[in-house]
């Protein structure tokens, strides 16, 4: 199946979250897909991020991911997801925060300025700001992380047009199928 990085895939509202969201349906190992497992999709990501990321004005142009760069991208991605997901779920996060900060430090020391890794590390640091981290949520449909910037913090979906509508359609189907409630 062909795959493209569309606007929807940058619904996180921060580069670090969009990177974390490159794993689809993390909560369901049977259906979960890692888009970065395909080198072609990983190398297309920085180009798409320059067009679609909410933070594109902050990081500007990104260099292509270097041959050995994918390992550090994946490490950083997992510590980002683990820490912020745990924070949203109100779990004990000190050890996870330590892992994330170590990973950010290592990334900033070892990567080039315009690399995806460096831009993602900076993005993760911005998320730690209390006004932002308190707005982080997990999409009720796909499990992606996103920033809820709505006034009354009532967003339930990473992207209303996709996950909101799919959930509505699913509920409709369940209500109207024979024997449904
Ligand atoms: Zn979603």
Image (tube, rainbow, N blue to C red):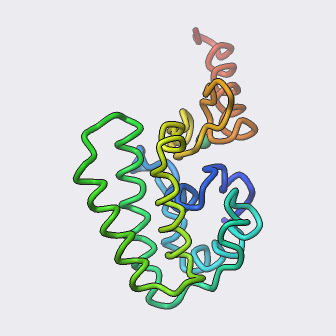
What residue lies at 50% left-to-right and 52% top-to-bottom? Answer: 127
Q: Position of residue 165 (x, y in %)?
A: 72, 32
Between 141 and 139, the one lying in front of the other is 139
Q: For this view, does 106 lie left or right of residue 115?
A: left
86 up-or-down from 106: above or below: above
Q: For this view, does 101 lie left or right of residue 122?
A: left
Q: Position of residue 34 (x, y in %)?
A: 49, 63
Between 22 and 84, the one lying in front of the other is 84
Q: How many marks?
A: 0
Quadrant, the C terminus: top right
Q: Quadrant of residue 74?
A: bottom left
Q: Say whether residue 128 is visible.
A: yes
83 up-or-down from 73: above or below: above
What residue lies at 69% left-to-right and 19% top-to-bottom? Answer: 172
Between 84 and 152, the one lying in front of the other is 152
Q: Position of residue 124 (x, y in %)?
A: 48, 60
Ligand 1 resides in the quarter of the picture at top right
Farthest bottom residue? 67
What residue lies at 47% left-to-right and 43% top-to-bottom? Answer: 130
Q: Say whether residue 4 is visible.
A: no
17 up-or-down from 142: above or below: below
Quadrant, the N terminus: bottom right
Q: For this view, does 176 lie left or right of residue 126?
A: right
């Amino acid at each position: 199946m062909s795959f493209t990085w569309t606007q929807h895939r940058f619904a996180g509202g921060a580069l670090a979250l969009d990177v974390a969201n490159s794993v689809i349906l993390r909560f369901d190992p049977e259906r979960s897909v890692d888009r970065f497992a395909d080198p072609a999709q990983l190398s297309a990501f920085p180009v798409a991020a320059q067009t679609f990321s909410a933070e594109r004005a902050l990081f500007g142009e990104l260099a292509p991911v270097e041959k050995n760069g994918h390992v550090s991208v994946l490490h950083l991605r997992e510590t980002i997801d683990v820490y912020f997901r745990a924070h949203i779920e109100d779990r004990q996060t000190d050890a996870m925060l330590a892992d994330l900060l170590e990973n950010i430090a290592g990334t900033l020391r070892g990567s080039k300025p315009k690399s995806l890794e460096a831009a993602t590390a900076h993005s993760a640091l911005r998320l730690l700001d209390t006004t932002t981290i308190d707005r982080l949520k997990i999409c009720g449909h796909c499990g992606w992380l996103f920033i809820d910037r709505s006034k009354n913090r009532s967003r339930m979906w990473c992207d209303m047009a996709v996950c909101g509508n799919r959930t509505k359609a699913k509920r409709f189907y369940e209500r109207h199928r024979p024997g449904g409630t």
